Structure formats: structure tokens, C-alpha cells
Amino acid sequence: MSLNHIRPWRNIYRRKSRQIMVGNVPVGGDAPITVQTMTNTLTPDVKATLAQVQAAADAGADIVRISIPDEDSSRALKEIVRESPVPIVADIHFHYKRGIEAAEAGAACLRINPGNIGSEARVKEVIKAARDHNCSIRIGVNAGSLEKHLLEKYGEPCPDAMVESGLDHIKILQDNDFHEFKISCKASDVFMAAAAYQQLADATDAPIHLGITEAGGLMTGTIKSAIGLGNLLWMGIGDTIRVSLSADPVEEVKVGYEILKSLGLRHRGVNIISCPSCARQGFDVIKTVEALEKRLEHIKTPMSLSIIGCVVNGPGEALMTDVGFTGGGNGAGMVYLAGKQSHKMSNDQMIEHIVEEVEKKAAELDAETAQEAAE
Ligand code: SF4
């Protein structure tokens, strides 16, 4: 249960946005903030692409995006959509025909900028295809690919230019009476992206897709995204997020979730609280946490686990977690359950034992949730 009512410093007041559907997943309004990623296999390789979609979904992705650069990809999309456990967004650039094909193939959403696909007649055709196939649209403004006239007007990519581009694309959809859209305005520069998103949040009530584009590798990209997306989410801006990393899509999903979990915006799986370790540690904290992170990946139930090297911080952290372990002397430590000291456990058996305790607690919490839902 959220205790935010007694901890007001944890409250985040979410910007009010319209809600749209991406397949069966609501985005915006009071829907949970969703996590997205994108495949990087060749789309016509249906087997490899589906394997990546499945792995991302297993890691918690709510929505997955796939590039549709050619007709072969549109054909493959049909098969992928049929088998995918999550809604698929088709990523389209410039080719209006790919947009129509993707909508016909069952994409839940098109990522397309209506201002970049040519004549009014072509725009209307794509919008019609989207409407006919219950497909929403994401306008995806990117500081690196702004329209020429905006670059001339503003001199260089900047938040004003990005927002103007976004509003121009919105107008095209609205003029065609199409309102099932969300919007992003990404930049690799954290300051530019954050400023653009803030302006955009004031200028439209459309759901907002957050992202820091080309953020970098796993480490640098995670930090950049945590700062950029973290700040915006903290301000209440953002209805769906994608962390862009030069890394496996599964890593993007994990980082996305961790950002949301850190802000209490979504809960999934075991939140491990662990100390950095020092000379006082009663067991090898770093190796243990590494092992537990892997061993507990299958747990989807939101819960907490504290793994603390010694009694300096162990009992205090254990007070606030579902399961806890605090290092002690003589090769053994103390196990805490629901904040209370429970029993001693030897270090060499503790990983196995903690996995069992966490699984037991997860089953208990799941049963409670099912009971509440039935009442
Ligand atoms: S909890 Fe103990 S072992 Fe961990 S960092 Fe603090 S003093 Fe060191």
C-alpha cells in the first residue's frame, strides 16, 4: 500500500493528459506510465525479432517498437503482430506507404511525423489507414531531424523549434479530426530535451512519450536518462517512456523500470536495497547482490529486500523491507521478515535461503492481492 499520504514529500502530481490506446494498453490520463523499447534485429527476420520482443516483454516492456524501412518489413510485421505478447508500434520515416501497410498489418501505433510524408493527399491516406485499423499515432520530434524551415528560423535546434515542429504535426492530425495521438520531442542533450518537454507539456494535453535520444551505452545512457527522464517524471510530465541505450533492448526495459521504481511511479519485481559494503561487512555484499539480482529476475511481485553488510545499517533498513539479511559474526547473519528479526542463517546458505524467503513472500503478497480483487 502506498504510504504517500503520510509522506507528502514523496508525492508527484502528474500532468493531466488525454488517454489514448496503443492496442490494449492505455497511455495517458491515469494509466500507469508504460515502458517501451525497440528491437534492433532485421524486421524481416521474424523469428529473431519475435524472440527480442518476447525477451523485452518478459523483462516488463508494455509496448515494443519495430522499424519498418521497407515492404519486406511490412510483410513481416503482420506475422510479428500476430504472435507478439505486447502491442507493436511501427516506426516509419518518410514513406507514407509503409505507414499504410503497417496499419493494415495490425500495428497498434504508427510512429510517424505527418508533416514529413509529403502531400496532403498522402497524409490523409495514412490517417485514414490508422483510423480504419484502430491504430494510434506517435508524433516523434527529434532535435537531430528538425524541418529545414525551422532550422532556418531558429538558427539551430532548440526547444522552441522542437515544440513548434510538434505543434505543426499535431495541427495536421487535428485538422483531419484525428485525436488518438501522443507526442515525443527527444534530444540527446538533456537540457534541450527537458526544456522542450516542459514547453510541450504546457502547450498540449496529448499524452507524452519521454526519451533522451542517442543517450549512449549502458552506463552513460542510463545516467543521462535517469537525470533527464527522472527530472521530467518528478515534475509529473510523461505518460510512457523509452530509455535509448546502445545496449540490449532488455537493458532499456530494466533501466526504464528502475527509473519509475525509484520515483515510486511503478512497482515491479524485487527492489533490492543494499549497502556499498566496507571493511565491516559480515559477508561479500557485492557478489551476493549480483547473484540475487539474477536469481530473483523471475519475481514480478512488487516487494523489497535489504541486503546489508553489518548491523550499522542492517536492522534499520530491514525495518522497512519485506525480507532482509544483515551480516553478523562467525560466518552467519540475521534474517528479517516483515521488518522483524526472524532467524540466523549461515553465509554459505544465505543466497539459496533468501531466494526461498522472497518466493514465499511473493506468493503471500500475490494471494493477498487476489483476495482483495475478489472482495
Ligand atoms: S552497512 Fe555496514 S558493511 Fe555496509 S557499508 Fe555500512 S558499515 Fe559497511
Image (cartoon, rainbow, N blue to C red):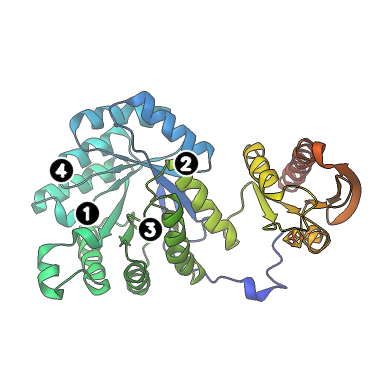
* Amino acid under disc 3: Gly
Residue placed at 21% from the left, 68% from the top? 157
Nearer to us of marks 4 and 3 is: 3
Residue nearer the viewer, 133 or 88 = 88
Nearer to us: label 3 or label 1: 3
User: Which numbered tag is attached to residue 95?
Assistant: 4
Q: Nearer the viewer, residue 240 or 344?
A: 344
- Along the horizontal axis of the image, is 100 left or right of 314? left
Q: Which residue in the structure is indicated by mark 2?
A: 250
| Horizontal and vertical percent position of residue 126 | 19, 45
Residue 145 in the image, given as x and y percentages of width and height? 19, 58
Q: Is residue 199 above or below residue 107?
A: below
Q: Which residue in the structure is indicated by mark 3? A: 211
Give the labeled residue for mark 1: 113
Say what secondary structure mark 2 lies in. Answer: helix
Q: CA distance from mark 3 to mark 1?
A: 16 Å
Quarter occupied by residue 364: top right
Q: Quadrant of ligand 1?
A: bottom right
Q: How far apart are the alpha carbons under marks 4 and 3?
A: 23 Å
Label 3: few (<14), some (14–19) or many (≥20) C-alpha neighbours in 10 Å: many
Which label lies toward us, 2 or 3?
2
